[in-house]
Amino acid sequence: MEELDIYKLISLIENELREIPKGTLKPDSDMTRAIEWSSLNVLMLLSLIQVEFNVNIGADRLSKCRTIEELYARIVEMKTT
């Protein structure tokens, strides 16, 4: 696992969720608009976070994150507790 970096997270999300064109997500991107929230995409994103960052964020916490920055902050918070 590499050091936590918001741009690494963005790159991983864009690679995992292929309907998002590479280079379109930014830290302040509204995930509720940028990502199609199908059950498959939710599972893929939760799995990505678990594998890459060793954090089990859960669907309930994920749904409370509106921007990539909020998701990143939640991951960092959970990593350090």
Image (cartoon, rainbow, N blue to C red):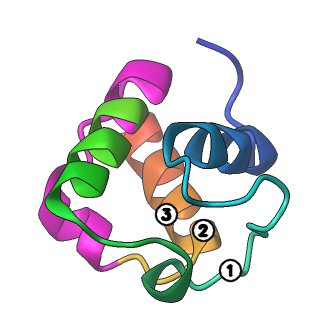
Q: CA distance from mark 1 to mark 2?
A: 6 Å
Q: At x 57% / y 47%, what residue is drawn?
A: 13
Quarter holding residue 72: bottom right
Q: Are marks 3 and 1 in contact (CB under 8 Å)?
A: no
Q: CA distance from mark 2 to mark 3?
A: 5 Å
Q: Are marks 1 and 2 in contact (CB under 8 Å)?
A: yes
On whether residue 60 falls in the magenta region, the answer is yes
Q: Position of residue 12 (x, y in %)?
A: 62, 37
Q: Amino acid at mark 1?
A: Ser
| Tag shown at residue 71 | 3
Q: Amino acid at mark 2?
A: Ile
Q: Which residues are magenta?
A: 49-64
The kind of secondary structure element at disc 1 is loop
Which mark is first along the chain, 2 or 1? Answer: 1
Q: Which residue is mark 2?
A: 68
Q: Which residue is mark 1?
A: 29
Between 81 and 10, the one nearer to me in the picture: 10
The kind of secondary structure element at disc 3 is helix
Locate the C terminus and report the quarter of the image it occupies: top left
> Could you tell me what secondary structure mostly forms the magenta stretch?
helix
Is the residue marked by circle 3 packed among few (<14), some (14-19), or many (20+) residues within 10 Å?
many
The answer to whether residue 31 is left or right of residue 7 is left
Q: Is residue 17 above or below residue 66?
A: above
Locate the N terminus and report the quarter of the image it occupies: top right
